[in-house]
Image (tube, grey):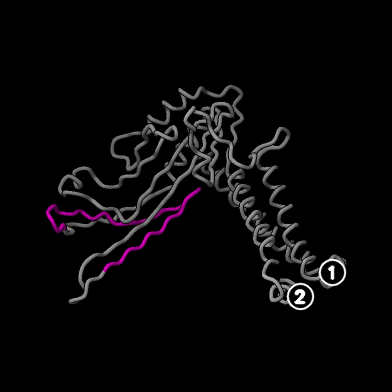
Amino acid sequence: MMPPALLASAQTLVERSKWFLVPAVLLALGMVYAMMECVAAFLARPSRRAHPSSRAALFARLLALNREGEPYRLQVARRADLDVIFDPVDPSWRARFASVKLTTGYRARLVLDEERHELRWFEMVWTRSGFVGFDGVWPRINWAVWAVAGYIDVQWTGWAFGLSGGFLPHVSSAVRFSLDTVALKREIRTIASRAGWSFHPKIWWFQVRRCADGAIPRGLVPSATRYWSERQFWGTVYLLSYVLTLMYIVVASSGWAELGRRATLLPLLGFSAFWWAIWGAIMLIFYLTNRRRVAG
């Protein structure tokens, strides 16, 4: 979307000195980080209840989700308040084997911030597959790992393998299972809302933990200011970092005079209108989707 003349100038600058890319990459990374924080803040569901419940009361309601037959288990965590453990295998099926291996794993972490009446949430899904054996007469080892972390709102599928005991265990049985990351979050979000607490997903694991003294770290960059909400803060940072990134590329490649030329300004404005229209649509979809889930 960059004007051809400006693109050619930028390419010439890169050929002359690669150091031009360092500030551009740093600004772009800052913009992406602000964008992620902005999305996470937008997903937060503040509660309008005048008198929120205590942390102990909310803690007890969350532990009450440990019902028999559910694939999830909430347990007290060492570095946080609660861990969500996913185990889709029926206990009677598991008891038939020496061990069970899952191709897909899930774990979530919760911290109850009583000062802000905020339930912080971080989750991770990972898949792994491996093979150790022989391909004909040649030994063969394959291993693959893939993970997604932050806020996950999808359904996954995987396999559970029942392994026999012995020196060389082998797969005795395999069953397919599904992982629904939506249903449990809907329940937890509803419980938090009824207790007068906000449900706030975070994109980094260190934002959902407790220090040795029990304090909750606020992060390297302040997520809220005295007068702005977290959405307003990160939305403003996102917008400013976007503008600064474009201005740096234009000025570093062609100078300040290029910003005043219609051949440069109009394509940049057109691209920006398209970019922010897409993000406006994404935020609207997030808002409507989460509103229906909370209402449900």
> Callout 1: 10 Å neighbours few (<14), some, many (20+)?
some
User: In this rendering, is residue 56 above or below 103?
Assistant: above
Mark number displayed over residue 9: 2
At 54% from the left and 26% from the top, the residue drawn is: 114
Q: Position of residue 204 (x, y in %)?
A: 52, 46
User: Which residue sits furthest left?
Assistant: 166
SS at mark 1 in the image: helix
Magenta segment, prevailing SS (helix, strand or loop): strand
Marks 2/1: CA–CA distance: 11 Å
Which quadrant of the view contains residue 43?
top right
Q: Report crowding for label 2: few under 14, some 14 to 19, many 20 or more residues within 10 A (C-alpha).
A: some
Labelled disc at residue 258? 1
Q: Identify the mark at residue 296; answer none if there is no mark.
A: none
Amino acid at circle 2: Ser
Asked if residue 121 shows in the view, the reply is yes
Q: How far from the left and from the top, in percent, is residue 268?
A: 77, 66
Instruction: Indicate the position of residue 164 as horizontal and vertical percent values.
Output: 14, 54
Q: Is residue 33 above or below residue 78?
A: below
Write down the region rendered in magenta.
141-169
134 relative to 181 in the view: left or right: left
In primary-sequence order, the first of circles 2 and 1 is 2
Between disc 2 and disc 1, the foreground one is 2
